[in-house]
Amino acid sequence: FNMFDLLLLLADGRVVYFGLAQEMVPYFADLGFPCPLYVNPADFIFDTLHHEGESDDSPQEKWEIEEEREEGEEERVSEEVAKKFTKLFQKSKRNELLQKSFLSNDSASGSSSIFSIQTLSCSSPSSPSSSSFDPSLPPSPLLSSSPDSSSSLSDFPEVLHEEDFPPVSTLCFSFAVAQFYLLHRSWLSYSRNRSVVFSRGMAAFFAGVLIGLIFFDQGDDVANLVSASCFLICAFGLFCLSTISVYIENQLIFQRDYQRGYYSAFSFGFSNQIVEFPILIAQVLIYAMVSYWMVGFSHSAVKFFVFIIIVFLQTEICFGVCQIFSLLCNTTNSAIAGYISFYLFCLALGGFLIPPSSMPGFIHKLMYTTPFWYGYSAVLVNQFEDYSNGQDILTRRYPVADQDLWLLIGILAQYYIVVQLFQAFLLEYFTKKSQ
């Protein structure tokens, strides 16, 4: 809020304040609405305009009123409250100073007028001078088109309509420029929330330790290694839930920028993937280095590297599905419920809880739609293909003996690409629909 110089505050289309942003809090304090300490002024004025004039109902009654409001219905400032604050501003000294500044003829000198008609933003010495004003721009209905005009704030329409404003031109950046700024913004967001990144790393570490302790020192037993493969594939899917709330917040920022034509949905998703990539790689490495060796998998460096690729693709798919449910659902809770349903579906048909040989025919076909099946099969093939009785192990209960390891990894990669493209399509579709 402190980054604003001038502030035009509207309520129900009516001007309730226009002036320096730093003077807004004292202005409303003079009206009898002091801003509490350590409260964001933007939140304060929002609550003041929305709740001023409400009846003195009990909290329980107010909650019932909130529940009765239809889903998706926006909370609006009442017309009476808007008129009240508009009249107070019209009678204020700030309005008198504003009218004098509009009527003054010294704006051409570019000197002292804060609300200069020609410069529009001359609120500090560092602001652009009046020479930067482009007279070819269409005049704004809020301001006089010439310093000699005798119009004042009282001459403006009380209610502002969309057709009163000139069309807003949008900027269109190239893909490279958009990526540069999106990467910079995303990286700043992660760097300012280092505790979140640290907590994700610690969660991966403790998850690896927990699974390693469960299957630690069990010997080179096939049943033990198969069960461990199941846990290693499934556990990381739950760590994606924390990204739902963050993605919903970023989605609001994207909708604002997309409507202005700054960048496309593909640019937004691509930048998020690039910034998330090193963090996710670090998580997978921590998780794999702890659990892989404690469980007792093959000590081959190549197999360990392949295991990291499988877990990484599996986790990326789960992250993408979380983002899809964030787009399809209106609230965080509904998005979490949707992802949990998908997770349980994959868990039931992944091939490790119910053996494929025990599944009915139509359910057995659904097994091939889950990414867990391909990840689980790839881990088993990676572990047992070099065993002397590996083919017998893989065909005894798990029909993956004829599956090629890199074919399974390729299917996971294709699954990941499809999820990301579908996410970008939904993001652009719902953003256009909201317009």
Image (cartoon, grey):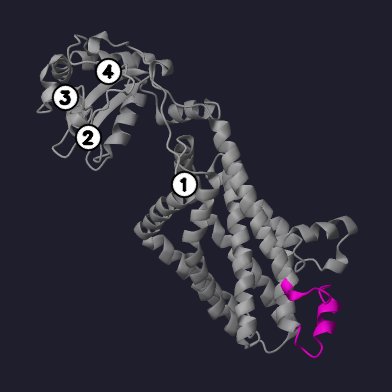
Q: Which residues are magenta?
A: 385-406
Q: Between 70 and 136, which is closer to the camera in this rendering?
A: 136
Residue 421 in the image: x percent, y percent?
A: 63, 51
User: Is 402 contained in the magenta span?
Assistant: yes
Label 1 sits on residue: 174
Discs 2/4, front: 2
Tags 3 and 4 in contact by the CB under 8 Å rule? no
Q: Residue at x 24, y 10 (%)?
A: 154
For badge 3, the amino acid type reads Asp
| Residue at the image point whose x is 56% and y is 39% from the top | 330
Mark found first going from the N terminus, 2 or 3: 2
Residue 357, given in percent of the width and then of the height, sits at 87, 68
Reading the image, the residue beneath label 3 is 30
Secondary structure under the numbered disc 1 in the rendered image? loop
Where disc 3 sits, the SS reads helix
Q: Secondary structure at mark 2?
A: loop
Query: Is residue 323 located in the magenta-colored stretch of the structure?
Result: no
Which of marks 2 and 1 precedes in the sequence? 2
Q: Are the residues at dot 4 and dot 1 in contact (C-beta closer than 8 Å)?
A: no
The residue most toward the right is: 361
What residue is shown with label 2?
Answer: 5
Q: Earlier in the sequence, mark 3 or mark 1?
A: 3
Task: Give the residue type at disc 4.
Answer: Phe
Residue that label 4 marks = 85
- Rendered image: mark on residue 126: none
Gap in Å between the C-alphas at discs 4 and 1?
Answer: 44 Å
